[in-house]
């Protein structure tokens, strides 16, 4: 990511793998925000491996960001949503995300 994250100011940061349709982890998303309104992100598209970055105002969840190359939308879910889902599906050992969710 070209932008350096200032962790003293950051309100939200995430760094996780994203899965393609087959459930393979073929992409990633790095995202952070200083005010939880404008989000800076870098994404590797799990469908076409295109890496792109940008900034976007994201207020309503779930978030979808479209890949500019293959135009498929990538769901950037919130860590808590995913953690709860995993707990339901597989039990607590399924929760292993390296996310920092500072709110
Ligand atoms: Zn793509």
Image (cartoon, rainbow, N blue to C red):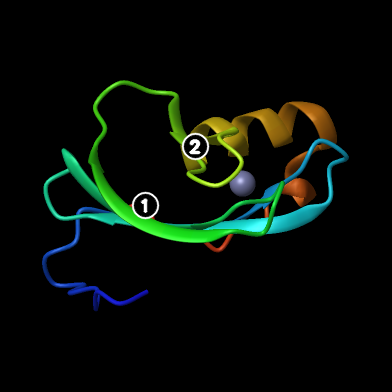
The picture places residue 12, in percent across and down from the top left corner, at: 28, 52
Q: Is residue 80 above or below residue 2?
A: above
- The crowding category of the residue bearing disc 1, from other C-alpha atoms within 10 Å (few below 14, some 14 to 19, many at least 20), is some
Query: Quick check: can you spot residue 30?
Result: yes
Badge 2, how many Cα within 10 Å: few under 14, some, many 20+? few
**Measured Cα–Cα span from mark 1 to mark 2:** 9 Å
Q: Are marks 1 and 2 in contact (CB under 8 Å)?
A: yes
With 41 as the anchor, is 83 left or right in this view?
right
In the rendered structure, which disc, 1 or 2, sits on the residue that comes first in sequence? Answer: 2
Q: Quadrant of residue 92?
A: top right
Residue found 50% across the figure and 42% down from its top: 79
Which of these two is toward me, 56 or 86? 56
- Give x and y (percent) for residue 49: 67, 59
Q: Which residue is mark 1?
A: 101
Measured as percent of width and height from the top left, residue 31 is found at: 37, 56
x and y percentages locating residue 84 in the rendered image: 61, 31
Residue 7, compared with residue 67, is above or below; it is below
State the residue in front, 77 or 50.
Answer: 50
Residue positioned 78% across, 51% down in the render? 93
Residue beneath disc 2: 80
């Amino acid at each position: 990511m070209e932008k350096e994250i200032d962790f003293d100011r950051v309100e939200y940061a995430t760094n996780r793998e994203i899965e393609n349709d087959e459930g393979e982890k073929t992409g990633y998303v790095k995202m952070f925000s200083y005010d939880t309104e404008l989000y800076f992100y870098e994404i590797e598209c799990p469908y076409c491996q295109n890496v792109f970055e940008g900034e976007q105002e994201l207020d309503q969840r779930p978030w979808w960001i479209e890949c500019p190359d293959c135009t498929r939308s990538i769901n950037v879910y919130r860590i808590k949503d995913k953690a709860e889902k995993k707990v339901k599906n597989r039990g607590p050992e399924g929760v292993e995300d390296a996310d920092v969710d500072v709110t």
